[in-house]
Amino acid sequence: MNSQDARSAIVGLNASLKRAGLDWVVQEVSRVVERGIEERKEVAFESFDAADEPIKKRGRRTEVTITRPLTEMEELRVLVASVRASVIDVNETQEKALLGLKTKDMENPSIGFRPDIPDGFEDKGYALTDERGRPFDLSLAEVERQKQRISKLKTIIMQLEEMIRAD
């Protein structure tokens, strides 16, 4: 897979995520991509006189940290891994957990999730910035609906993972 193919895959996958209502994944990955990758480099300093002639005395080598942009392939790997971990694997884990609770008497089990937030959090003036931290119920029926909605996305991710491995 060359750089142009990777870029095309990134654009297509981001469009698919937005169509599926998963803009938050695109936003999270965007933050990672814009930060780049930190790398350590060893540099040597040289001194020059007014005539741009090097002075024989050289400084010792020093290690510095630089930030470089991700390559197209690195971006694609980050995006694919993020979708796998935050959407596909989460859905599969939820499904397994709820199927484990299913009985003859309870065809559609559900789990109520409550926020792991200290008492008085909002009373102190802190604010929950989005839906994270809000209570919600998760039912097997909802997880199965979500599984159907992301089935095409899962296929795309599996194909991209195979292409990345082949590279």
Image (cartoon, grey):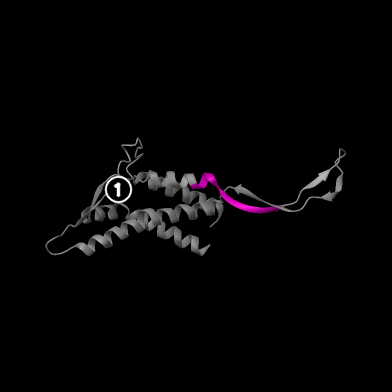
* Identity of the residue drawn at 26% across and 54% down: 143
Q: Identify the residue at the far top of this view.
A: 125
The disc labelled 1 sits on which kind of residue? Pro
Q: Is residue 125 left or right of residue 55?
A: left
Magenta range is: 32-42
Q: Is residue 65 left or right of residue 122?
A: right
- Tell me where residue 81 sits by quadrant: bottom left
Residue pointed to by mark 1: 115
Above-or-below relation of 137 to 50 = below
* Identity of the residue drawn at 77% across and 48% down: 45
Q: Identify the residue at the far left of this view.
A: 105
On the image, the x and y values in percent for residue 137 come to 23, 50
**Which residue is nearer to you in this view: 63 or 99?**
63
**Which residue is nearer to you in this view: 91 or 46?**
46
**Which residue is nearer to you in this view: 53 or 59?**
59
* Identity of the residue drawn at 48% across and 44% down: 31
On the image, the x and y values in percent for residue 129 come to 36, 39
